[in-house]
Image: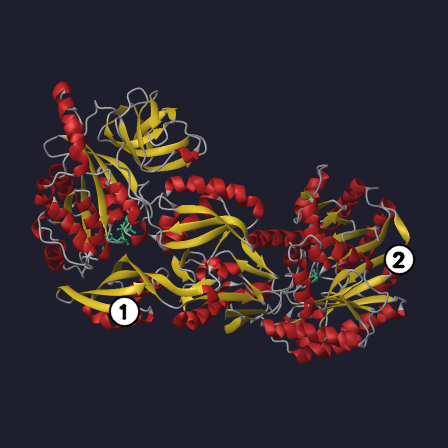
């Protein structure tokens, strides 16, 4: 559990989706420079985290890189860092990039988990959020991955889109499940202020789903997938038995991870730091022999406790009662949580129920 | 002399004062207090000659009903005196406290010395004290008046004479001050100068021809008022050569300088280096600085008799300074202290508990320092099973309570719970024991109660005739009895009711204002205790009794109160992750309930890398917010809820 994870942020996309405020840019001409800079950044951390037992290429769109560059990237990582034998190696991929060649390359590079950015299997919705693929392209890409021998595949979906009905959403879900992914991430749409959809919402051009609607979507998603045999193990994540995403669990369990690339975040067990979001600044700092870090904080015991709470209540792992025993009015609160069906107590842990997940952001405060 | 006292008492009896003119008022009667001093002084004067500058000082207050424009008039004087340039100026510049600016009312008296040169080229120092108009702060007015020889009595030209116009006038008369009536806001389209003049004559007994017309907003009449001040208000009659006598009328704690004392010198002089003595306890201090109040403190070489200013003497022990004490010189002490101020009689009580018991000590210190600056607050130690160590405080009214609460939070950074306000009840128990209770916690065992009684007031309400029906309805709802009417002027009514104090302390005033479209006003005096069936109303939050919410109420009103408080709690308590049941009960019997539904959803979809820090920061902020809440079982009750529950309307 205390093995570290390595995350590399690929700050490029072919085009911007309307719901997204991740840091990425569509001008790929900076890719060679970025690759070189990343290599320099990697050398700064050489042995600090290794060995890693998870590697995650995310973004942005890792598959927006040419095959050649992706290969170079992975080889650099293999050269600079030490990885464990049973490495979980995930790459986020967009369906429109997954040609047979590309899929084969992923396989060759040792990738053993692909998270496919399907988002929806309704063509109208896909074009509304400006994805570059349609539903059948996504399904074909998925099949291609399977045929090439990938045994752990994840599907990324987004729901509660403006205008989406529970019915169209469950249709997407149904179609996605037919692909038999080992893992699903289903994200309820967050209208990010600076995303195109967010801007449309503030201008009143689109209507945000109401709270009751959001609840309904959330609860339906959970029961649908649980019925299909998936474990709802984190607020937005579902997996078949033994297929939990090792890398992402590190974020929630407080294990160390190193993030490389612009806007990437790192945590070494006591301190968190983060890189500048701007790719230009990232390149300049590294070329000047500096560090691309934009900030760092060392966590006080109090801060770690807070993080433990806020992360714990987002997963089915919950929070150990031992950790919260000093909370004021603990008895009354635990009783109230159980009575209201927000949490159960099992093996000395307070474990949120699905209803509890719906209040994951509010639960920590009860124990402060 | 007799007739003046009679006049003052007339008001208590509800009768009108007889007509008299301002000039007469001053000339006819010499103040009791001053005439004694006068005797000693006149002997000294013969030997030493008159103090040179005395004739050039004028000490006066601006008094009026709330909002009649006192602070705005002060603005004009300050600008006339050239104390601020255009850039520094802001409306009601003397209202320097954040709270005053936010609420648009004066809370504390403010003193400022204005230079003024009259048409003959004679220059004066005018010590102006701007006073608050709200009834809860009338103690501020009474202290200000003790430092003055005259007042400007402002009357709003469209509102006319109101309740505090009258009560402040009486206070000025008690102090034997020269009164200059000023009719303000004549620029308003609804201004009715003739009506106000008639009221001055018939209701106040002042000579309407002496009234000066003014618009503080537009600056008309300012020069006339200044001329009247120097002509009609006498200069202070004190003697600088007598032993020092300085009356402390206000004080403030400064972390660097210690206590800064505001005082009026009646006799003698004081300068840096002098050793002063506080006459109540005899402790001595060396003076570091003296000075005058301009917009900020302005150090001076010395202060002498007749002047109003400040003294800094390195007083670090806050409890050494008592408002109303007399300062004298250690080397040449005065024979006797000045009379000081009337005791304050709190009418509203509430307990104050630190949210976290570790903060008790800091609350003790904060209260001590706060009390320096607000002598009207009284407090003593108190404790509660649920809330721990705290203080029982007495206030002059609900606004006073709110102001104390906010100032302690803002200026002294305290966080505490204040319990539901209460008045003082009397219970006669079996065995003829009489118990006085101002804290519902101490409500006696009901089986031992023979009779119970609550304080009554005589409420005097001014209202335009057209609102009479609404006013009477309000008074009846508040258990008012024995209505009497006077009509001081055509179209206006003075309505007098006997009412339980408990029914007016909360929002009676606001209600009255709104039903009379701002034209109604009210004043009251305590009128003894009356028997009534008083019960204790408890509130339960998720089944748990919250003792700080308990109320003593009249049985006839119990249900109404229970419903109201349950509804208000529902508004005040933030949503939780679970449902919250709120119940009102008398002796275990539930008589009202409401339910606060839970949050429906409170989660964001993603939580990776950077989201964690962001979420933690948010949680840290929420935790701070939670510090201002009291945990009752699993429920967080905001600090302000305890006081807020009594207010009927949720704005
Ligand atoms: N039209 C008009 N409005 C005025 C005049 N004088 C004051 N006001 C307004 O009346 C309101 C109250 O003025 P203040 O000067 O704060 O009244 P105040 O008597 O000091 O009030 P308190 O200190 O709270 O008792 C403000 O909105 C002023 O702008 C005036 O001559 N004409
Ligand atoms: S959703 Fe993915 S592909 Fe779309 S803009 Fe965001 S990072 Fe790029
Ligand atoms: Mg004012």
Q: Residues within 10 Å of mark 1 (few under 14, many from 20)?
A: some
Q: Is residue B216 visible?
A: no
Q: Are marks 2 and 1 on the same chain?
A: no
Q: Would residue B46 appear left or right of B409 to someone viewing this image?
A: left
**Horizontal relation, residue B390 to residue B140: left or right:** right
Q: Residue at x 75, y 54 (%)?
A: A322
**Badge 2: how crowded within 10 Å, few (<14), some, or many (20+)?**
few
**Quadrant showing the C terminus of chain B:** bottom left
Whether residue B135 is visible, yes or no, is yes
A41 and A186: which is toward the camera:
A186
- Report in which chain the residue with disc 2 lies: A
Residue B377 rendering spot, x and y as whole percentages: 38, 46
Q: Which residue is mark 2?
A: A110
The foreground one among B217 and B474 is B474
Task: Indicate yes or no: mark 2 CB to ligand 2 under 8 Å.
Answer: no
Instruction: Name above or below for residue B422 compared with residue B464.
Output: above
Q: Are marks 2 and 1 in contact (CB under 8 Å)?
A: no
Outermost right residue: A85
Check disc 1 and report the residue beneath it. Answer: B481
Q: Position of residue B394 (x, y in %)?
A: 39, 50
> Which residue is depicted at the point 38% across and 25% down?
B285
Residue B121, numbered circle:
none
* Mark 2, secondary structure of its residue: loop
> Residue under mark 1: which chain is it in?
B
* Residue A191 on image: x %, y %: 60, 64
The extreme front residue here reads: B431
**Quadrant in which residue B60 is drawn:** top left
């Amino acid at each position: 559990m205390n093995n570290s994870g390595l995350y590399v942020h690929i700050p490029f996309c072919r085009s911007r989706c309307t719901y997204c405020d991740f840091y990425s840019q569509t001008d790929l001409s900076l890719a060679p420079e970025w690759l070189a800079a990343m290599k320099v950044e990697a050398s700064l951390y050489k042995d600090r985290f290794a060995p890693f037992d998870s590697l995650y290429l995310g973004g942005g769109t890792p598959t927006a890189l040419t095959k050649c560059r992706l290969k170079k990237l992975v080889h650099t990582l293999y050269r600079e860092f030490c990885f464990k034998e049973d490495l979980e190696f995930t790459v986020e991929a967009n369906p429109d990039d997954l040609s047979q060649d590309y899929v084969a390359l992923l396989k060759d590079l040792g990738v053993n988990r692909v998270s496919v950015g399907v988002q929806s299997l309704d063509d109208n919705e896909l074009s509304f959020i400006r994805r570059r693929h349609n539903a059948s392209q996504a399904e074909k890409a998925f099949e291609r991955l399977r045929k090439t021998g990938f045994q752990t595949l994840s599907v990324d979906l987004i729901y509660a889109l403006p205008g989406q009905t529970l019915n169209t959403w469950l249709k997407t879900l149904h179609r996605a499940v037919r692909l038999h992914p080992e893992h699903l991430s289903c994200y309820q749409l967050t209208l990010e202020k600076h995303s195109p959809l967010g801007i449309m919402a503030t201008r009143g051009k689109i209507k945000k789903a109401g709270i009751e609607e959001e609840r309904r979507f959330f609860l339906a998603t959970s029961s649908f997938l649980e019925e299909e045999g998936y474990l709802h193990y984190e607020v937005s994540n579902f997996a078949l038995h033994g297929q939990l995403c090792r890398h992402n669990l590190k974020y929630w369990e407080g294990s160390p991870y190193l993030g490389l690339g612009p806007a990437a975040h790192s945590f070494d067990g006591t301190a968190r730091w983060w890189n500048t979001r701007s790719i230009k600044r990232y390149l300049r700092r590294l070329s000047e022999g500096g560090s691309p870090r934009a900030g760092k904080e060392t966590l006080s015991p109090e801060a770690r406790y807070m993080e433990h709470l806020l992360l714990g209540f987002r997963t089915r792992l919950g929070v150990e009662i031992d950790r919260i025993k000093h909370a004021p009015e603990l008895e009354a609160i635990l009783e109230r949580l159980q009575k209201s069906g927000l949490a159960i107590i099992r093996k000395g842990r307070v474990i949120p129920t699905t209803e509890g997940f719906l209040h994951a952001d509010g639960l920590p405060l009860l124990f402060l | 002399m007799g007739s003046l006292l009679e006049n003052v008492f007339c008001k208590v009896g509800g009768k009108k004062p007889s007509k008299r003119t301002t000039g007469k008022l001053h000339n006819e009667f010499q103040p009791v207090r001053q005439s004694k001093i006068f005797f000693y002084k006149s002997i000294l004067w013969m030997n030493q000659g008159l103090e040179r500058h005395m004739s050039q000082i004028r000490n006066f207050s601006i008094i009026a009903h709330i909002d009649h424009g006192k602070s705005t008039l002060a603005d004009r004087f300050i600008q006339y005196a050239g104390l601020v340039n255009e850039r520094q100026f802001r409306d009601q510049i003397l209202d320097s406290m954040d709270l005053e600016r936010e609420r648009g009312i004066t809370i504390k008296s403010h003193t400022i010395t204005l230079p003024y040169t009259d048409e003959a080229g004679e220059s004066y120092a005018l010590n102006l004290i701007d006073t608050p108009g709200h009834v809860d702060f009338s103690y501020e007015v009474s202290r200000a008046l003790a430092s003055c020889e005259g007042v400007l009595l402002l009357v709003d030209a469209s509102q006319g004479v109101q309740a505090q116009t009258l009560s402040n006038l009486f206070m000025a008369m008690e102090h034997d001050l020269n009164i200059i009536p000023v009719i303000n806001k004549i620029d308003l389209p609804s201004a009715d100068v003739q009506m106000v003049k008639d009221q001055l004559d018939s209701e106040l007994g002042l000579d309407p021809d002496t009234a000066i017309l003014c618009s503080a907003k537009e600056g008309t009449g300012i020069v006339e008022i200044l001329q009247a001040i120097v002509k009609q208000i006498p200069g202070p009659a004190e003697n600088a050569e007598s032993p020092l006598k300085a009356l402390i009328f206000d004080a403030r704690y400064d972390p660097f300088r210690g206590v800064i004392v505001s005082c009026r010198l009646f006799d003698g002089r004081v300068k840096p280096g002098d050793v002063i003595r506080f006459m109540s306890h005899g402790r001595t201090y060396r003076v570091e600085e003296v000075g005058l109040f301009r917009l900020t403190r302005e150090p001076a070489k010395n202060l002498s008799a007749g002047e109003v200013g400040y003294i800094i003497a390195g007083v670090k022990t806050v409890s050494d300074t008592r408002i109303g004490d007399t300062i004298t010189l250690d080397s040449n002490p005065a024979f006797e202290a000045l009379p000081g101020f009337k005791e304050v009689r709190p009418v509203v009580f509430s307990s104050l508990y630190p949210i976290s018991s570790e903060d008790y000590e800091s609350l003790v210190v904060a209260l001590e320092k706060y009390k320096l600056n607000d002598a009207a607050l009284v407090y003593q130690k108190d404790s509660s099973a649920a809330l721990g160590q705290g203080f029982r405080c007495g206030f002059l009214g609900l606004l006073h309570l709110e102001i104390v609460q906010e100032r302690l939070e803002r200026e002294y950074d305290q966080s505490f719970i204040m319990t539901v306000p209460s008045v003082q009840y009397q219970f006669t128990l079996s065995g003829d024991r009489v118990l006085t209770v101002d804290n519902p916690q101490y409500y006696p065992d009901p089986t031992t109660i023979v009779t119970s009684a609550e304080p009554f007031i005589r409420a005097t309400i001014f209202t335009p005739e057209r609102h009479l029906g609404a006013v009477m309805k309000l008074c009846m709802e508040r258990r008012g009895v024995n209505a009497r009417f006077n009509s001081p002027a055509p179209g206006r009514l003075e309505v007098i009711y006997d009412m339980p104090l408990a029914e007016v302390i909360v929002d009676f005033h606001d209600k009255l204002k709104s039903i009379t479209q701002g034209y109604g006003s009210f004043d009251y005096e305590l009128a003894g205790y009356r028997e009534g069936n008083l019960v204790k109303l408890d509130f339960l939050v998720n089944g748990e009794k919250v003792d700080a919410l308990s109320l003593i109420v009249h049985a006839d009103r119990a249900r109404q109160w229970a419903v109201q408080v349950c509804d208000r709690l529902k508004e005040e308590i933030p949503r939780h992750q679970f449902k919250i049941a709120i119940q009102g009960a008398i002796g275990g019997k539930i008589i009202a309930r409401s339910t606060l539904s839970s949050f429906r959803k409170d989660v964001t979809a993603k939580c990776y890398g950077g989201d964690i820090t962001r979420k933690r920061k948010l949680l840290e902020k929420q935790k701070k917010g939670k510090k201002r809440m009291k945990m009752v079982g699993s429920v967080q009750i905001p600090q302000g809820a305890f006081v807020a529950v009594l207010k009927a309307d949720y704005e």
